[in-house]
Amino acid sequence: MRVMRRSAGIAIFWLLVRRLLENGANSSFVSVAADPAVPVSQILQPAAAWIAASKSGAPPRIPLPGDLYGASRKNSSGVEFGDRASLAACLSEVRGAAHASRALPLIDGVARPGKRRAVASPIDRCGCWHVTEGDAALARPRWRGAERLSSMGR
């Protein structure tokens, strides 16, 4: 039991060291934490507060997330899973779309038959989704075609 506690303590210590190094690489946390002139309350501020207080702002040559792909297409806005309101809105949309969504084999843009089965959501285990799976016989001709194309490029 004593050995187990010691090894768990060592594992936690190295985890904390790793986190400290990761944070240091991302936000100069290590240099600020080592400065005795910086109050502890300032060190413990959330990262968002540090970023908001930054005088430099966003680098002008790095595009905003929505503009990441340039003019060719808009990037998705994403969901902040740490924000309860954002997560609740996302889950509500997922539940609303569950009955309208279909997942099925498409070949050349044409829906193909297959075996239909229920799928549980990894979020809340709701079994309200369905997927239609193609079999090997459906995939085999396409697989052969892909192999032919691949061998032509060699």
Image (cartoon, rainbow, N blue to C red):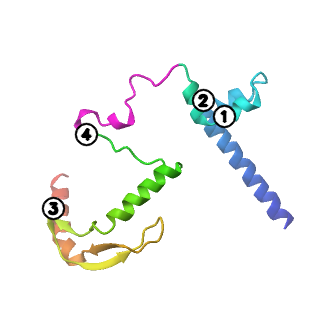
Measured from the top left, where is residue 69 in percent x and y? 30, 37
> Which tag is nearer the camera, tag 4 or tag 1?
1
Q: Earlier in the sequence, mark 3 or mark 4?
A: 4
Labelled disc at residue 73: 4
Q: Alpha-carbon neighbours of circle 3 within 10 Å: few (<14), some, or many (≥20)?
A: few
The reply to whether callout 2 and callout 4 are in contact (CB within 8 Å) is no
Q: Earlier in the sequence, mark 1 or mark 3?
A: 1
The residue where tag 3 is placed is 148
Q: Quadrant of residue 21?
A: top right
Q: Mark 1: which secondary structure?
A: loop
Number of numbered markers:
4
Q: Alpha-carbon neighbours of circle 2 within 10 Å: few (<14), some, or many (≥20)?
A: few
Q: Earlier in the sequence, mark 1 or mark 2?
A: 1
The reply to whether callout 1 and callout 2 are in contact (CB within 8 Å) is yes
Q: Is the residue 107 above or below the residue 9 in the image?
A: below
The residue where tag 1 is placed is 45
Q: Is the residue 10 above or below the residue 105 in the image?
A: above
Determine whether, in the image, residue 57 is placed left or right of residue 64: right
